[in-house]
Amino acid sequence: MEDNKLISKSFLWMCIGLLVTFVTGFGVASNERMLENIFNGNTFWLFVVLEFVLVIVLSWRCMKMSPVAAKICFILYAFVSGLTFSSIFVVYDIASIMMVFLVSSVIFGVMAFIGYKTNVDLSKLGFYLMMGLIAVIIVSVINIFIGSNGLEMALSIICVLLFIGITAFDVQKIKSLEGSGLPEDNLAIYGALELYLDFINIFIDLIRIIGENKD
């Protein structure tokens, strides 16, 4: 790739965020008492709400924060995500998790490269992908009450396809922000959050599709 400091910093912080999430998730899953404390009672839902609040704050206020505050908020979000993410290590076999992580990395890397290199304007595609994602979220909420395993599997497949496209769109968007005059460190955290969410969603939906449960 051509030299683009913003893209490089965004990917660096994305990797840091993923490392924090996976290490936290694995650590919690390895400690029975921590698992009980998180998943018993209302504690889990408090972390889910905190996770949601943090991602909203980062998405909307990232450019108005100090660079240090933005970085701390991103790491905190990755850590809280790791607490809820620990269920993955409880449900799925570690070899399966590693395999899905590798597959997700390859898919994500290929689409990121395409998004960086293509000269095609993906902004219109991004609009339709976001509309599709909203539709999937609505149907997913409805399926909570229906409880259809077939529909859940179909939604996971659709989500993987959507986030494959969104990855390319986000990388092109981040690339276009280089030289925009906005604070580079804040832009890097904003970009890292976008890329982090893309990767995590690809991973989670793929493991639902091809992951192997523990015996």
Image (tube, rainbow, N blue to C red):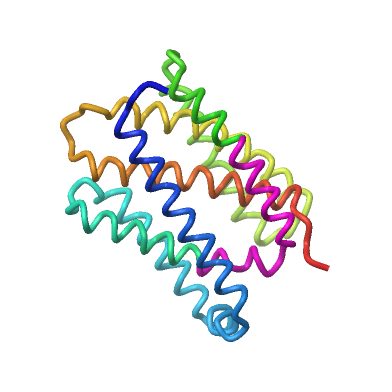
Q: Residue at x 43, y 65 (%)?
A: 79
Horizontal and vertical percent position of residue 143: 67, 55
In the displayed structure, does residue 132 sit left or right of residue 65?
right
Identify whether 106 is placed above or below 116.
Answer: below
How many marks the image carries: the answer is: 0
Identify whether 182 is placed above or below 49.
Answer: above
Q: Residue at x 58, y 78 (%)?
A: 39
Horizontal and vertical percent position of residue 89: 65, 65
Horizontal and vertical percent position of residue 110: 57, 29
Of residues 200 and 11, the one nearer the viewer is: 11
Question: Which quadrant holds the C terminus?
Answer: bottom right
Q: Quadrant of residue 146?
A: bottom right
Q: Residue at x 40, y 26 (%)?
A: 172
Of residues 80 and 185, the one nearer the viewer is: 185
| Residue 101 part of the magenta-drawn span | yes
Q: Quadrant of residue 3?
A: top left
Question: Which quadrant holds the N terminus?
Answer: top left
Identify whether 45 is placed above or below 194.
Answer: below
| Residue 143 part of the magenta-drawn span | no
Q: Quadrant of residue 111?
A: top right
Q: Main secondary structure of the magenta part?
A: helix
Q: Residue at x 67, y 53 (%)?
A: 98
Q: Which residues are magenta?
A: 83-106
In the displayed structure, does residue 142 sit left or right of residue 79?
right
